[in-house]
Amino acid sequence: MTPETLQIIAIASIILSVLLGAWVFVLGYRLKKLLSGEKAQSLEGLIRALGEDIRALEKFQKETTGYLNEAEKRISRSIQGVETIRFNAFKGTGEGGNQSFAIALLSENGDGTVVSSLYSRDHVNVFAKPIKNFASEYEMTPEERDAVSRARKLSA
């Protein structure tokens, strides 16, 4: 190799070294800026904090799901359909007017009770019958069946 060629190679190597040094300096500055955020919070600390937040959110989601499942169970057992039918139990004698009634109180599954009252001038009789799946093991009057049927429509 000639001395001129060696001189060109040396100059090119020096220029390349200076450019690489500048590039390393810029990358170091950018990396330092990335790793030390505002208020001296590092990227590692930020990632750790985000991980803790994610774990807290997962715990909250699990607790909320459990609570909602329990609430759903309670709601399905609560009274969803209420219907009152008033009627005259003694139409033939003219006593009572529309003072008698049947009230159905049912959950969305059709469980609950129907309460009936037969009113006359001399006395009042009150009856309660358990309802399971929109039916009773006891014989129901037409008014009680009507109250259960209407309450079923409301609970659906």
Image (cartoon, rainbow, N blue to C red):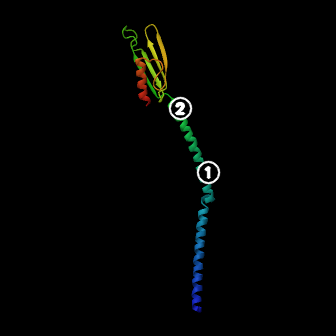
Q: Amino acid at mark 1?
A: Glu
Q: Where is mark 2, residue-wise?
A: 74
The answer to whether mark 1 and mark 2 are in CB contact below 8 A is no
Give coordinates of residue 145: x percent, y percent: 42, 21
Number of numbered callouts drawn: 2
Q: Where is mark 1, residue-wise?
A: 52
Q: Amino acid at mark 2?
A: Arg
**Quadrant of residue 4 within the rendered picture:** bottom right
Front-most of residues 52 and 137: 137
Name above or below for residue 68 compared with residue 6: above
Name the residue furthest bottom: 2
Give coordinates of residue 134: x percent, y percent: 45, 25
Q: Is residue 52 left or right of residue 130?
A: right
**Quadrant of residue 65 within the rendered picture:** top right
Quarter of the image with the N terminus is bottom right
Quarter of the image with the C terminus is top left
Give coordinates of residue 130: x percent, y percent: 50, 21
Seen at 52% across and 35% down, the residue is 72
Seen at 39% across and 9% down, the residue is 95
